[in-house]
Protein backbone atom coordinates (compact mmCIF):
# COMPACT_ATOMS: atom_id res chain seq x y z
CA UNK A 1 0.00 0.00 0.00
CA UNK A 2 2.88 2.39 0.75
CA UNK A 3 4.22 1.95 -2.79
CA UNK A 4 0.74 2.61 -4.19
CA UNK A 5 0.46 5.86 -2.22
CA UNK A 6 3.97 6.85 -3.38
CA UNK A 7 2.97 6.23 -7.01
CA UNK A 8 -0.15 8.36 -6.56
CA UNK A 9 1.80 11.21 -4.95
CA UNK A 10 4.22 11.22 -7.88
CA UNK A 11 1.18 11.32 -10.16
CA UNK A 12 -0.21 14.41 -8.46
CA UNK A 13 3.05 16.32 -8.90
CA UNK A 14 2.29 16.40 -12.63
CA UNK A 15 -0.53 18.85 -11.89
CA UNK A 16 2.18 21.45 -11.23
CA UNK A 17 2.80 21.75 -14.99
CA UNK A 18 -0.65 22.98 -16.08
CA UNK A 19 -1.29 24.74 -12.77
CA UNK A 20 1.94 26.75 -13.10
CA UNK A 21 0.74 27.92 -16.50
CA UNK A 22 -2.66 28.88 -15.08
CA UNK A 23 -1.13 30.67 -12.08
CA UNK A 24 1.57 32.59 -13.95
CA UNK A 25 0.62 32.61 -17.64
CA UNK A 26 2.96 35.51 -18.45
CA UNK A 27 5.93 33.74 -16.87
CA UNK A 28 5.01 30.10 -17.59
CA UNK A 29 3.73 30.46 -21.12
CA UNK A 30 2.39 27.47 -23.04
CA UNK A 31 5.69 27.38 -24.93
CA UNK A 32 7.46 26.92 -21.59
CA UNK A 33 5.08 24.04 -20.76
CA UNK A 34 5.79 22.48 -24.16
CA UNK A 35 9.54 22.96 -23.72
CA UNK A 36 9.50 21.37 -20.27
CA UNK A 37 7.53 18.38 -21.52
CA UNK A 38 9.77 18.01 -24.57
CA UNK A 39 12.85 17.81 -22.32
CA UNK A 40 11.04 15.44 -19.95
CA UNK A 41 10.06 13.27 -22.93
CA UNK A 42 13.66 12.95 -24.09
CA UNK A 43 14.83 12.13 -20.54
CA UNK A 44 12.20 9.42 -19.97
CA UNK A 45 12.81 7.89 -23.39
CA UNK A 46 16.52 7.59 -22.59
CA UNK A 47 15.84 6.21 -19.10
CA UNK A 48 13.35 3.66 -20.43
CA UNK A 49 15.65 2.62 -23.27
CA UNK A 50 18.45 2.04 -20.77
CA UNK A 51 16.14 0.26 -18.29
CA UNK A 52 14.59 -2.04 -20.89
CA UNK A 53 17.80 -2.90 -22.76
CA UNK A 54 20.30 -3.22 -19.90
CA UNK A 55 18.10 -4.36 -17.02
CA UNK A 56 18.91 -1.27 -14.95
CA UNK A 57 17.21 -1.84 -11.62
CA UNK A 58 17.27 1.26 -9.46
CA UNK A 59 15.33 1.22 -6.20
CA UNK A 60 12.98 3.89 -7.56
CA UNK A 61 11.94 1.51 -10.34
CA UNK A 62 11.16 -1.20 -7.80
CA UNK A 63 8.99 1.16 -5.78
CA UNK A 64 7.24 3.06 -8.55
CA UNK A 65 6.67 0.48 -11.28
CA UNK A 66 4.23 -2.39 -11.35
CA UNK A 67 4.88 -6.01 -12.22
CA UNK A 68 3.54 -5.72 -15.78
CA UNK A 69 5.85 -2.74 -16.40
CA UNK A 70 9.04 -4.71 -15.78
CA UNK A 71 9.44 -5.62 -19.46
CA UNK A 72 7.27 -2.86 -20.96
CA UNK A 73 7.46 0.93 -20.97
CA UNK A 74 6.73 2.08 -17.43
CA UNK A 75 3.76 4.18 -16.45
CA UNK A 76 5.86 7.23 -15.62
CA UNK A 77 7.16 7.33 -19.19
CA UNK A 78 3.69 6.90 -20.68
CA UNK A 79 2.52 9.68 -18.34
CA UNK A 80 5.02 12.07 -19.92
CA UNK A 81 4.20 10.84 -23.44
CA UNK A 82 0.47 11.42 -22.90
CA UNK A 83 1.02 14.86 -21.37
CA UNK A 84 3.41 15.86 -24.18
CA UNK A 85 0.98 14.76 -26.91
CA UNK A 86 -1.76 16.86 -25.34
CA UNK A 87 0.58 19.85 -24.84
CA UNK A 88 1.67 19.82 -28.48
CA UNK A 89 -1.84 19.11 -29.80
CA UNK A 90 -2.66 22.78 -29.22
CA UNK A 91 -0.76 23.40 -32.44
CA UNK A 92 -3.59 21.66 -34.34
CA UNK A 93 -6.54 23.65 -35.68
CA UNK A 94 -9.26 24.19 -33.09
CA UNK A 95 -7.32 22.72 -30.16
CA UNK A 96 -6.63 25.14 -27.32
CA UNK A 97 -5.13 25.09 -23.87
CA UNK A 98 -8.76 25.05 -22.64
CA UNK A 99 -8.78 21.41 -23.79
CA UNK A 100 -5.17 20.55 -22.93
CA UNK A 101 -5.12 21.81 -19.34
CA UNK A 102 -8.11 19.80 -18.07
CA UNK A 103 -6.91 16.70 -19.93
CA UNK A 104 -3.62 16.96 -18.04
CA UNK A 105 -5.44 17.53 -14.75
CA UNK A 106 -7.61 14.46 -15.39
CA UNK A 107 -4.43 12.40 -15.44
CA UNK A 108 -2.64 14.19 -12.61
CA UNK A 109 -5.59 14.43 -10.19
CA UNK A 110 -8.42 12.18 -11.36
CA UNK A 111 -6.35 9.07 -11.97
CA UNK A 112 -4.63 9.01 -8.55
CA UNK A 113 -7.96 9.44 -6.78
CA UNK A 114 -9.43 6.58 -8.79
CA UNK A 115 -6.30 4.51 -8.24
CA UNK A 116 -6.43 4.83 -4.48
CA UNK A 117 -10.12 3.92 -4.45
CA UNK A 118 -9.93 1.12 -6.97
CA UNK A 119 -7.90 -1.91 -7.80
CA UNK A 120 -4.15 -1.65 -8.30
CA UNK A 121 -4.31 -4.47 -10.85
CA UNK A 122 -4.01 -2.93 -14.30
CA UNK A 123 -5.82 -5.78 -16.03
CA UNK A 124 -9.13 -5.52 -14.18
CA UNK A 125 -12.10 -3.27 -14.85
CA UNK A 126 -12.67 -1.09 -11.80
CA UNK A 127 -15.80 -1.15 -9.67
CA UNK A 128 -18.75 0.97 -10.83
CA UNK A 129 -18.62 3.35 -7.87
CA UNK A 130 -14.92 4.04 -8.47
CA UNK A 131 -15.66 4.79 -12.13
CA UNK A 132 -18.45 7.16 -11.06
CA UNK A 133 -16.02 9.02 -8.80
CA UNK A 134 -13.51 9.22 -11.66
CA UNK A 135 -16.19 10.55 -13.99
CA UNK A 136 -17.30 13.15 -11.45
CA UNK A 137 -13.79 14.34 -10.68
CA UNK A 138 -12.78 14.56 -14.35
CA UNK A 139 -15.98 16.33 -15.38
CA UNK A 140 -15.54 18.85 -12.56
CA UNK A 141 -11.90 19.41 -13.57
CA UNK A 142 -12.99 20.16 -17.14
CA UNK A 143 -16.02 22.32 -16.27
CA UNK A 144 -14.13 25.61 -15.73
CA UNK A 145 -12.45 25.30 -19.14
CA UNK A 146 -14.96 23.92 -21.64
CA UNK A 147 -18.75 23.97 -22.15
CA UNK A 148 -20.78 21.44 -20.10
CA UNK A 149 -21.29 18.92 -22.92
CA UNK A 150 -17.57 18.90 -23.68
CA UNK A 151 -16.75 18.50 -19.97
CA UNK A 152 -19.07 15.48 -19.77
CA UNK A 153 -17.54 13.94 -22.91
CA UNK A 154 -14.07 14.45 -21.46
CA UNK A 155 -15.16 12.88 -18.18
CA UNK A 156 -16.63 9.87 -20.00
CA UNK A 157 -13.50 9.38 -22.12
CA UNK A 158 -11.11 9.70 -19.17
CA UNK A 159 -13.25 7.30 -17.14
CA UNK A 160 -13.27 4.77 -19.95
CA UNK A 161 -9.49 5.05 -20.28
CA UNK A 162 -9.07 4.65 -16.53
CA UNK A 163 -11.49 1.77 -16.17
CA UNK A 164 -10.58 -0.44 -19.09
CA UNK A 165 -6.97 -1.27 -19.88
CA UNK A 166 -6.87 -3.51 -22.94
CA UNK A 167 -3.88 -5.60 -23.94
CA UNK A 168 -2.62 -5.18 -27.48
CA UNK A 169 -0.01 -7.69 -28.63
CA UNK A 170 0.69 -8.51 -24.99
CA UNK A 171 1.18 -4.87 -23.92
CA UNK A 172 -1.19 -3.18 -21.49
CA UNK A 173 -2.46 0.15 -22.87
CA UNK A 174 -1.63 2.16 -19.77
CA UNK A 175 -4.12 4.78 -18.64
CA UNK A 176 -1.26 7.22 -18.05
CA UNK A 177 -1.17 7.53 -21.82
CA UNK A 178 -4.84 7.10 -22.67
CA UNK A 179 -6.49 9.36 -20.05
CA UNK A 180 -5.07 12.69 -21.27
CA UNK A 181 -5.17 11.75 -24.96
CA UNK A 182 -8.74 10.42 -24.98
CA UNK A 183 -9.94 13.11 -22.57
CA UNK A 184 -8.53 15.88 -24.77
CA UNK A 185 -9.89 14.31 -27.94
CA UNK A 186 -13.38 13.96 -26.47
CA UNK A 187 -13.39 17.55 -25.17
CA UNK A 188 -12.20 18.82 -28.54
CA UNK A 189 -15.09 16.98 -30.24
CA UNK A 190 -17.50 18.48 -27.69
CA UNK A 191 -16.20 22.02 -28.12
CA UNK A 192 -16.14 21.78 -31.89
CA UNK A 193 -19.39 19.94 -32.61
CA UNK A 194 -21.78 20.39 -29.68
CA UNK A 195 -23.58 23.72 -29.29
CA UNK A 196 -23.69 23.70 -25.48
Image (cartoon, rainbow, N blue to C red):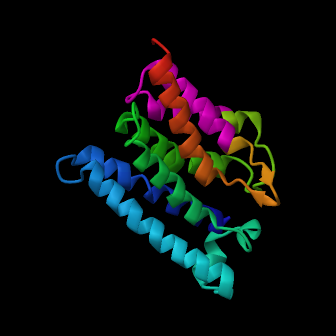
Which one is nearer the viewer's eye here, 57 or 184?
A: 184
Quadrant of residue 55 in the image?
bottom right
Percent x, y of residue 109: 50, 47
Residue at the location (39% across, 68% down)?
39
Residue at the location (77% across, 56% down)?
121
Percent x, y of residue 159: 64, 37
Magenta range is 132-161
Q: Quadrant of the image for the N terminus?
A: bottom right
Percent x, y of residue 91: 37, 43
152 magenta-colored: yes
Quadrant of residue 171 in the image?
bottom right
Q: Quadrant of the image for the C terminus?
A: top left
Residue 176 in sight from this viewpoint: yes
Give the residue at the far front of this rendering.
93
Percent x, y of residue 112: 57, 51
Question: In this rendering, is residue 57 above or below 189?
Answer: below
Residue at the location (59% across, 75% down)?
48
Question: In this rendering, is residue 77 above or below 115?
Answer: below
Left or right of 141, for residue 183: right
Question: In this rendering, is residue 43 above or below 11?
Answer: below
44 magenta-colored: no
Which one is nearer the viewer's eye here, 87 or 8?
A: 87
Amino acid sequence: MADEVSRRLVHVTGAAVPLAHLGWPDLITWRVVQGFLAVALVVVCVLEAVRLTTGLDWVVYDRLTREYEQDNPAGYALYIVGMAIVAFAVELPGVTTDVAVPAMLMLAIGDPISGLLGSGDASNVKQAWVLLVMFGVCTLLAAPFVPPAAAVLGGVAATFADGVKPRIAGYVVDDNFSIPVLGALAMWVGVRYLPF
